[in-house]
């Protein structure tokens, strides 16, 4: 059975979904996106994703074609129509199509945005075996544009980073700028030293992760010490443990960086506990 997707106000079988070849998301990567996880048929951190979406749109002076209440209803309708128990809802909004290619933005009063949503079913999403074994990462130069805090669809270099990791026989890559770790290819990066959680402070250099915000709040509530600052690659390799956070990976331990094992080479207690806390609290708050 075909997935039902949402395109510009209509629910359609995926085979019937179409957008213009002149859409600026296709031609210019002129668009933003969000991914909201689904566990037990409910949405995790929807309010956070909606707030970040609005911020991304505002930073790019792009209109939103629906209200946040309507957006929540669309998410729920797609989850229901596609029978998603565990998985994700992908949302993308672009500046639309003016009917031709031009670097200049079209008049938003004349050209409506394009909005697309679809689901991805991922049974057992919260029971990823990698959480028990940990991830291995390499470091790569961070050569992305300067506004990484805006969640745009400009994902070529993160995709290349993931392919660099695959070619190196590991799971992912951490990006490095001026000797300091910025973030993973699709996640925020953390190290743990002496029980203290260290992760890069918010700024234009990294994405303001929704899962990041929730995990740091829960860590502080659990009386864990958190320090928000940049850390070096050498500091990361000397850490007791490390982990990443993202909407789909939740909290995922990292056990090796550039071939250097961290601690015992197994998932550490801080990352393991944070994953348990996050999943438990997120399920309780899911809508």
Image: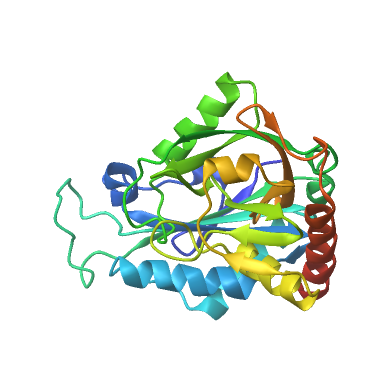
State the image quarter where residue 41 is shown: bottom right
Total labels drawn: 0
Q: Give the percent coordinates (x, y) of residue 70.
A: 54, 76
Q: Is residue 264 above or below residue 51?
A: above
Colour scheme shown: rainbow
Regarding residue 147, the answer to whether it shows in the image is yes
**Along the line of sight, the residue nearer the viewer: 156 or 144:** 144
Residue 271 in the image: x percent, y percent? 78, 54
Q: Quadrant of the N terminus?
A: top right
Q: Residue at x 24, y 64 (%)?
A: 111
Q: Answer with left or right where residue 186 lies relative to residue 46.
A: left
- Vertical relation: 61 (above or below) 172: below
Q: Nearer the viewer, residue 156 or 208?
A: 208
> In the visual, does 22 lie left or right of 150?
left
Residue 116 in the figure: left or right of residue 209: left
* Position of 42 relative to 126 (above/below): below
Camera-side residue of 112 and 283: 283
In the foreground, 201 or 233: 233
Residue at the spot x=49%, y=33% of the render? 161
Residue 209 in the image: state x and y as whole percent: 56, 62
- Quadrant location of the C terminus? bottom right
In the displayed structure image, the side of residue 146 where residue 40 appears, left or right: right
Residue in view at x 61 percent, y 44 percent: 236
Residue 65 seen anywhere in this rendered image of the structure: no
Which residue is depicted at the point 17% across and 45% down?
Answer: 101
């Amino acid at each position: 059975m075909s997935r039902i997707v949402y395109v510009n106000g209509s629910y359609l079988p995926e085979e019937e979904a179409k957008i213009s070849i002149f859409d600026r998301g296709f031609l210019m990567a002129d668009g933003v996106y969000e991914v909201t996880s689904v566990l037990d048929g409910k949405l995790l951190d929807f309010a956070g994703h909606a707030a970040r979406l609005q911020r991304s749109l505002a930073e790019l002076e792009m209109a939103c074609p629906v209200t946040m209440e309507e957006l929540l209803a669309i998410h729920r309708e797609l989850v229901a129509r596609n029978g998603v128990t565990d998985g994700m809802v992908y949302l993308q909004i672009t500046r639309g199509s003016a009917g031709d290619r031009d670097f200049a933005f079209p008049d938003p009063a004349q050209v409506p945005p394009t909005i697309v949503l679809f689901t991805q079913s991922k049974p057992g999403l919260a029971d990823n075996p990698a959480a028990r074994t940990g991830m291995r990462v390499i470091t790569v130069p961070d050569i992305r544009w300067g506004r990484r805090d805006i969640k745009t669809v400009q994902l070529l270099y993160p995709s290349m980073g993931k392919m660099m990791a695959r070619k190196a026989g590991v799971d992912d890559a951490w990006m490095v700028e001026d000797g300091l770790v910025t973030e993973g290819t699709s996640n925020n990066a953390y190290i743990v030293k002496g029980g203290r959680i260290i992760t890069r402070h918010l700024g234009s250099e990294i994405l303001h992760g929704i899962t990041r915000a929730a995990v740091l709040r829960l860590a502080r509530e659990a009386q864990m010490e958190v320090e928000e600052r940049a850390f070096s690659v050498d500091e990361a390799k000397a850490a007791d443990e490390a982990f990443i956070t993202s909407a789909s990976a939740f909290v995922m331990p990292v056990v090796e960086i550039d071939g250097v094992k961290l601690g015992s080479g197994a998932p550490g207690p801080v990352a393991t506990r944070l994953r348990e806390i996050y999943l438990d609290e997120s399920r309780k708050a899911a809508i």
